[in-house]
Amino acid sequence: MAVRIIGTGSYLPKNVADNNFLSTIVDTDDEWIQQRTGIKERHLSGGKEGTTYMATQAAEAALESADIDAEELDMIIVATVSADTYVPSTSCSVQGNIGASRATCFDINAACSGFLFALNTAYAYIEMGMAKTILIAGAETLSREVDWSDRSSCILFGDGAGAAIVRKEEGESGGFLASVTGSDGSQGEVLTCKGRGIQNPFHHSKRRKDYIHMDGQAVFRFAVTTVPRCIKQILKKTELDTEDIKYFILHQANERIIELIAKRLKISMGKFPMNLDRYGNTSSASIPILLDELNRNDLLERGDKIILSGFGGGLTWGAVLIEW
């Protein structure tokens, strides 16, 4: 038996903001953005398409892809840093929207590594016999967390959601093969987004809300060092070579980061699919959106080995090896 991904789905808002459009908002231009990030455009919510709405759409697409009903779900896990509400959780709202009345629901926050942490969590629940079929999703409305007067950050992020159905399949092989994860809270300040200030009878903060703040150089150094290391750990653990892996599906943050990771691993860029030019950085949604695109374009075949790897605020990181 094997714990497999049996269906995928994704959703992107209808509004598209290209680099030329952003140049009307902040002091930037298309060439400057593309040279530094590889991003050409990103999808942004028009208001209706919040985190719950997008997660619901991606979930329904994943259920259709897996050809199962929502009633078969034992659990829903949503990774997000931009929930519409503190309570209810995004996962509970998705449950209500899709009619998954049997599912236990909770959200997790591991920033851009969130989908991988959700995948690991689903695997653990299934292996312990506490669930059989789990919906995992990464969904973000980062446009509400961005300072649109800061050209260093507003150009990077987009909104979207991706989802997958994870199930234990009897009589199957492959599936989930290995994972590594890590965190380093001592470096948490290099990427932050603070909430509202404390308001109670003992303290009154003037700060209402903060925006995403990032030390871009520190995050760059962290990513190009940590991701190759955890991919090597996965390969060593499973006694595989890079030639055995069809695709390395990385968090879609920056084209230069992915190129340098490939160079340090001495792997052809052809094994690193990218869509960040069209969507920007969608945090926890980036890996499942890309995975869904590969799946729906018939670029994944049974038996293909792929490594998913993410990195993000916290700091957090991880890699998962699966056989499709």
Image (cartoon, rainbow, N blue to C red):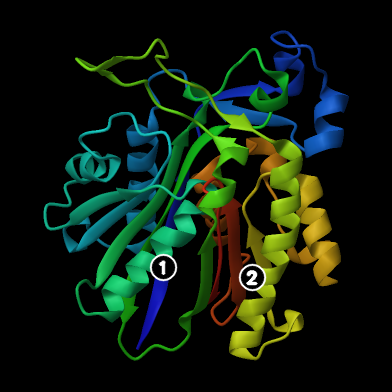
Q: What distance separates the C-alpha of mark 2 from that of mark 1? A: 15 Å
Residue at 74% across / 79% down in the picture? 242
Up/down of 285 relative to 193, above or below: below
Q: Which residue is mark 2?
A: 230
Is 122 rendered above or below residue 115? below
Q: Residue at x 65, y 82 (%)?
A: 235
Q: Is residue 222 above or below residue 150?
A: below
The spot of residue 108 in percent (x, y) is: 35, 50
Residue 63 falls in which quadrant of the image? bottom left
Please identify, in this view, whether the residue under mark 2 or under mark 1 is nearer the observer.
2
For residue 37, say whether it is visible. yes
Tell whether 226 sits left or right of 83. right
Q: Position of residue 294 (x, y in %)?
A: 60, 59
Q: Which mark is residue 134?
A: none
Q: Is residue 90 left or right of residue 243?
A: left
Q: Quadrant of the N terminus?
A: bottom left
Which amino acid is tagged 1?
Answer: Asn
Disc with the residue nearer the chain's start (2 vs 1): 1
Residue found at the far left of this picture = 101
Is disc 2 placed on a helix, strand or loop? helix
What residue did someone put label 1 on? Answer: 120
Crowding at dot 1, Cα within 10 Å, few <14 / some 14-19 / many 20+, comes out as many
The residue positioned 39% from the left and 36% from the top of the image is 54
10, 196: nearer the viewer: 196
Amino acid beneath label 2: Cys
SS assignment at label 1 = helix
Q: Is residue 158 left or right of residue 175?
A: right
How busy is the neighbourhood of tag 2: few (under 14 within 10 Å), some, or many (20 plus)? many
Asked if residue 7 can be seen in this view, the reply is no
